[in-house]
Amino acid sequence: MQLGRAAHRRLVTLLAALALAGCAAAPPAPPPARLGLKLAPATLGSSVSLQQHLTVERNGRTDQLDAALEIDPQQFNMVGLAFGQRVLTLHYDGVTLQSWRHPMLPSQVRAEDVLEDTQLTLWPVDAIRQALPAGWEIRQQGLRRTLSLQGEPVMVIDYSTALPWGGKIELTNLRYHYHLTIESVSDDVAEPTTAP
């Protein structure tokens, strides 16, 4: 489907903004605060099918993206949409991560980072803790989750409900200075075996 010139410009602007808003790799200094986290889908302890609306705020700018997310014990699948057009797909089976991107999606938007951020917000904190490299720590107090590197908070995640796919998640990245709001609507959820 051909995009009109104005819609094409909006799509390019949105994709560039997303690259700057946390899905992107870090600037050359300091080194990127990425975990390389790739938890097996089964460690979620649930099967979920979600429709998500993402709002990214950075430097006074706000951009939005819609996503469809399906996770079961065998696989993780995500489709990202901007202006009704598919811009990103991810498939992870616990071993291999496969991705497709819109040709104009910036190369800095890495599938590994999208998977990692999704797992940091949705997976049980105990499953994340067991996979953390040396120097990293994650703590959950009530509806707030804090990820730290060598004692310095890197990310704060606030939940509106005890089950992360039942409401709103607000992620604040303290290192890269962006705020991500994720509003989820569950199409189907199998009850988890553990709390977040």
Image (cartoon, grey):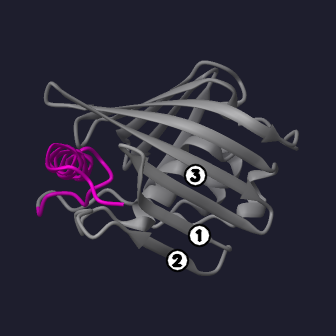
Where residue 196 sits: x, y (%)? 70, 37
Dot placed on the residue nearer the N-terminal end, 2 or 1:
1
The amino acid beneath tag 2 is Gln
Residue occupying the point 66% across, 41% down: 50
Within 10 Å of disc 1 (Cα), the crowding (few <14, some 14-19, many 20+) is some
Viewer-nearest residue: 174 or 24: 24
- Which amino acid is tagged 3? Gln
Q: Which of 63 and 41 is in front in this view?
A: 63
Mark closest to the chain's N terminus, 3 or 2: 2
Q: Measured along the vertical axis of the image, is residue 69 above or below residue 90?
A: above
Q: Which amino acid does label 1 sit on?
A: His
Label 3–label 2 contact, CB within 8 A: no
Query: Real-space Cα distance between discs 1 and 3?
Result: 13 Å
Circle 2 residue: 98
Q: Residue at x 14, y 50 (%)?
A: 5
Q: Mark 3 points at which residue?
A: 119
Decide which of tag 1 and tag 3 comes sooner along the chain: 1
Q: What stretch is highlighted in magenta?
A: 1-28
Magenta segment: does it hold 76? no
Q: Distance between the residues labelled 3 and 2?
A: 16 Å
Residue 171 placement: quadrant: top left
Q: Can residue 121 be seen in this view?
A: yes
Instruction: From the image, tell me which residue sits under label 1.
Output: 91
Q: Where is residue 30 in the image (x, y as percent from the top left)?
A: 16, 57
Q: Where is residue 47 in the image (x, y as percent from the top left)?
A: 80, 50
SS at mark 1? strand
Residue 22 included in the magenta stretch of the image: yes
Tag 2 and tag 1, C-beta contact below 8 Å: yes
Identity of the residue furthest to the bottom in this view: 96
Provide the secondary structure element on which disc 3 rests: helix
